[in-house]
Structures are given as structure tokens and as C-alpha cells.
Image (cartoon, rainbow, N blue to C red):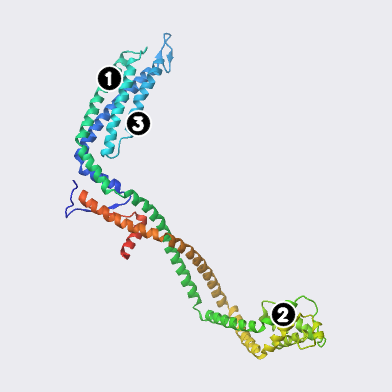
Amino acid sequence: MGVRASREAPRQRVGLLELRDWVTEQVEERYNQGLVDVLAALVSAFRVLVRVENVCVEIGEILYVSVDEDGKQNRPSKDFQAAKPHLDAIVHTIEAYGKEFPSSLDQSSVSSMVKGLHEVLATVSKSGKSLSDLYLKSSGEKIGQLMDILQMFKSELGVAVKEAEAVCEEHKLVLKEMFRIKMRVLEGWDVALDEFQMLRETSKIRVDYEQTLQRYNHCKEETLESFEDSMYDESLLLKEHTSELTAKMDTMLAPFIRISHNIKGKGKIGGPSLTDDELALIRKYTIVLSEPDLYPRIEANGSSLEDFLEALFLMGIAGGVGMHESAAKQSGFSKKSQIILAQALDNFNADELRSCYTKWRELHLRREAIGKDERFVEKDMRVQRGSAMWLEAAKEMDRISKEWQRVAPIHIRCLENFGKYQMSVCCKCQEELGIAVELEMPEEVLVEYEQEVKDR
């Protein structure tokens, strides 16, 4: 019994969240006459209920105050207390029925309203009879008139209920058709809403991901731009070359550094053939070798590279290298240290170390000079600040990337499902309502969905 869409059917945009109300409105407009008759019948019955309620309230107000033989007023009166449960039953039942009056009419809501009318009628009849059976001392002409009016309204209510039931039965097929159309067009709507809620959460993560990516790229570009400076480039190049030379010298001096750590703080270094000055030189450079800033200290405070090299060879003498076993034992070096020291001296190339150190010192001095330049200091501060921001952005990028990877499959699935549901609603609206509909995603995720459609 669906209505086929014409070729000139208007195209309407409907939001997902507004779909149910929109479908209800369209169905009610299409079957307006049938709904008008049903609504008129229900409203007619409801008007009678309002009159019944007003009469009950008026009866209660009159009975509330009584006057005894001495002219004294009693509040509340005994008559009121006796009648109150029956009056309350009628009033409360009518008010509850009015609160349940539906915002839209369909087969289910109309059937519920008709059933409710029968229940209200039963309550009015039962409580009305109980009121009539009461012997009210304060009953007067006014109370009698109101009781008669209540009985009359009860009869009118019975007629109104029968008429409402008849009208609803007459339009039963229309109501069923309205219900069928709504159910078919709105099929899957609840599921679509649930997926929209998930999509809203995943879209927030997607937005965070894109914003973090932009911030990361911005920090990266700014940092890399800071590096594009001849002076800064030279400093970085010098740092790289000095690091290479440092690593090479570290390898050459590794055995001596190890031995210096072993003998540091172990007391006097022996050596029968060494003068006090020579022993002092060994102790001096033993300390230098055990410090992390080794190379800047080799020629510090009047020292020289040649003194350093001499100390290395004197260390061999002090360690008893090449001596008789008895003399070697007096050196204070362990046998293992003596072996290491002997191998180190055999493999040591003083000219190679001299060449490396000379190059290192030249590059080191040039780098120090650049580091004292105000332009470099300012540039370096910008680079350090930019690098810190880049690192922070990289950490945040790593976190949000993992979060996005976790929810991306859900996000894509929800977008795909909405596309399918969108097509389904469009087809059903064409078939049932004759309207070409474009179902829209809520604004907060609409852009994301439109971009996804373009990318397909």
C-alpha cells in the first residue's frame, strides 16, 4: 500500500537525529484526515473528563468546610474526609491519563488511549457510585446539583468512549498502515544511532590525530629551518668531525683509561728508576685519563700533548713492564694490569694519536669560537627550543597514532554502515512516501563522512 515516488519528487535533506520526528510528521500529513477524526474523538472524550474533574474538585471544596450547631467551622469536615478517597481516585486517574496523551498518533498509541478511556470510565463509575451512597450531613442543594451533574457527565463519558472506540476501529487500517510505514522506514535507526555515538568518539580521536600531525609537522619544519644557517651548519659539521676523532682516540687510549681507573686512589705508584717529577707526571695524567672531559684537559694549565705521551710510556715503566718478576711486583700494578699495559704500549702509535689530537684541537677551538658568537647563541637557543617542542610533539604523535590505529577499524566500519543505511532510508522514503531523501550525518561528524565518500 506504499506510495510510489514521482519523478518530480522534492529532494529533502534530513539529519540522522531528526529522522524519526521527520518520518512521523510525513506519515501524519499523508493520512491527515484519518488522524483528524481519531484525534477529534479522543479530544471529545478528554473534554468530558476535564468537566468530570472540575465537578469533583468543586464538590471537594464545598465539603471541606462544615459548620456545627454552635456556628463553628470545622476544617476539614467529616463529610470531606469520607468523600476524599473517592474524589481523589477520579481526579488522579484523569490527570494520569492526560499525562499519557501521545505526541503523535499511531496504532499502538491510539489503542493505548482507548484502553485508558475504559479504565478511567470504570474508575469514574465506581467512585461516583460510592459518592452517591455516602450519607453526607452537609449535603445541600448545591451538592445535590453537583452530584447530578457528575452522573450526567459519567453518562456522557460512556457515550464518548464508545464513539472514540468506533472511530478508532473505523480507521484501524489507516493506523496499521501508518505504523507499518514508520517501522519500515525507521528500521535500523536505533542501531544507526548507536554507531553514530561510536563514530562521534572515534571522530574526536581522528581530529586529535590530524591536529597533532599538523603541530608535529609545524615543529619539524621550524626546527629544520633553524638548522639552515651557515654558521650553525659549520658548528654541526665541526661537532660531527670532533666526535669522530674523539671516538678514534678513545679506542687508542681505552687500555690506559681502564688502568687509570684501576689504580686511581690506590696510593703511591712505585718505580725504582723513576724520579719524583716523572711519578708526579704519571699521577697527573692518570687523573686526567680517568675524567670524562679527557681531551680538553690534556693541554690545560700549561700542560702539553708531549707531556701526556711521555706519561703513557712512563706508566709502563712504573707498571714494571719488561722488568724482572721481583721488580714488577714492587710496582703496585696487578699482573692483569701489567699484561694490559704491555699490550697497549706494544700497539700504541704515538704519531697517530698526535695527528688525531692536533686535528681535534683545531676543530674544537673553531667550534668554541663559533659557540661564543652571539648570533650562534641566539640561533642555538631557537634550535634547542624548537627541538624540545618537536620532541614533545613526536611523543604526542606516537601516543595519538597508537590510539587512532586502535579505533580506525571501528571508525571506518561505522562510516561504511552509515553509507549503507543512508541508501536504505533513501529507497524506503521513495517507495513509501514518494520523497527523495538525503540522510545527513550530524554536523559534528558530517565533514569526516563527506571526505570519506570523496576518497572512495
Q: Is residue 12 visible?
A: no
Q: Quadrant of the N terminus?
A: top left
Inter-mark Cα distance, 3 to 2? 97 Å
**In the visual, does 344 lie left or right of 119?**
right
Q: Secondary structure at mark 1?
A: helix
Few, some or many residues within 10 Å of mark 2 (<14, 14–19, 20+):
many
**As shown in the figure, which amino acid type bears the numbered disc 2?**
Ile
Mark 3 → mark 1, Cα distance in angstroms = 21 Å
The three-letter code of the residue at mark 1 reads Gln
Question: Cα distance, mark 2 to mark 1?
Answer: 119 Å
Instruction: Give the numbered dot on residue 236.
Output: none
In this orientation, does residue 223 appear?
yes
Which circle's residue, 3 or 2, is located before the other in the chain? 3
Left or right, residue 345 beside residue 430: right
Q: Which mark is residue 259?
A: 2
Circle on res. 96: 3
Q: Nearer the viewer, residue 405 or 78?
A: 405
Q: Which mark is residue 151?
A: 1
Residue closer to the observer: 339 or 164: 339
Q: Quadrant of residue 339?
A: bottom right
x and y percent of residue 209 in the render?
A: 43, 63
